Image (tube, rainbow, N blue to C red):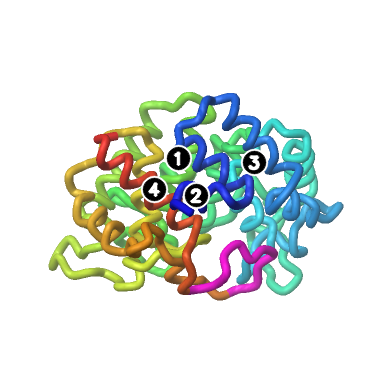
Amino acid sequence: MNVIDWLLDSDPAIRWQVMRDLAHEPANVVAAERARIAAEGWGAQLLALQAQDGRWGGRAWSNDWTDTFHVLELLRLFGLDPHAEPAVRAIALVRERVDWRDPDFETPWADNRFFQGEVEPCINGNVVATGAYFGVDMQPLVDRLLGEQLSDGGWNCEVENGATVSSLRTTVNVLEGLLQHERAIGGSDEVRAARHRGEEYLLERRLFRRRSTGEVINDAWLRFAFPTWYHYDVLRALDYLQSTGEAPDPRVAEAIGVVEGNRGADGRWLLQRVHAGETHLDMEPGEGSPSRWNTLRALRVLEWYAQGG
């Protein structure tokens, strides 16, 4: 079985993206496959787990991956059609019934509705991405993120604890949110300029090197996970950049080399990292196994680079 056929032998969440990004099927064929996410496979499984209080896992956010925040992130990454009736119903429940209250902790933002966000830009960037994707007005939270952009161009969740420089991990979360917001409303000069400053922060570091010394910041970033959750790696950053539709910057060349270097002899990429935590779905056989998600994302990144955007 060739790699494309292997990718297509999977869940609709993967299959429709392969059809769109790699096989370049007609739009109506892609749309028909995408529509299946709400009715079968992983997407339908997650939708069925939502409680009547709007939550998954009993919480807005938790230290594992079964909560509302992380399930909505997966549904967005799956490409669940935001206009599909099950998606509309699920988002309405979240908007109406979910706040940031946690039964185990007292937090000053407990009464915030889910799509109002909380205080950490890495979390709020993801909330913006999800809300904008599913048709929620995220402008107030976007305005907050714009005000939190640091002078070096990025963002850092640890500003409350004294951080004065940005982090790649926080920055990529915010960039994904700003891009979804632009797509939802048609964009604005202010948001686009902030996003480009954030992208420059990544590119100045070649996506994984210290600007000051050129050293690799974290060797783990050269091994790929899916889902990444709030974590960072080179493939996530490249997949974000290709999703902007802009031509690849020459400074991604080394990161592209990392992706190519991780391809196996069979043309597939492995699931190289699994971020510990309980989850509703086991989408891959396990760490070290061939990964359809990583292979899909790596192939579309390489195609984007080869074609110049």
Q: CA distance from mark 4 to mark 3?
A: 18 Å
Tag 3 secondary structure: loop
Q: Residue at x 36, y 57 (%)?
A: 267
Mark 2 vs 3, N-terminal side = 3
Residues at discs 4 and 1 in contact (Cβ within 8 Å): no
Q: In terms of depth relative to the viewer, which is nearer, 127 or 234?
A: 234
Q: Which residue position holds label 3?
A: 80
Q: In terms of depth relative to the viewer, which is nearer, 74 or 204?
A: 74
Q: Residues within 10 Å of mark 3 (few under 14, many from 20)?
A: many
Tag 4 secondary structure: helix
Q: CA distance from mark 2 to mark 3?
A: 19 Å
Identify which amino acid the numbered label 4 is placed on.
Asp
Question: Position of 242 compared to 251: left or right?
Answer: right
Identify which amino acid the numbered label 1 is placed on.
Leu
Mark 1 vs 3, N-terminal side = 3
Residues at discs 2 and 1 in contact (Cβ within 8 Å): yes
Residue 125 coordinates in the image, percent (x, y): 50, 49
Our reading of the magenta stretch's main secondary structure is loop
Residues at discs 4 and 3 in contact (Cβ within 8 Å): no
Q: Residue at x 59, y 24 (%)?
A: 28
Q: Which mark is residue 125?
A: 2
Give the residues drawn in magenta, as a range: 277-287
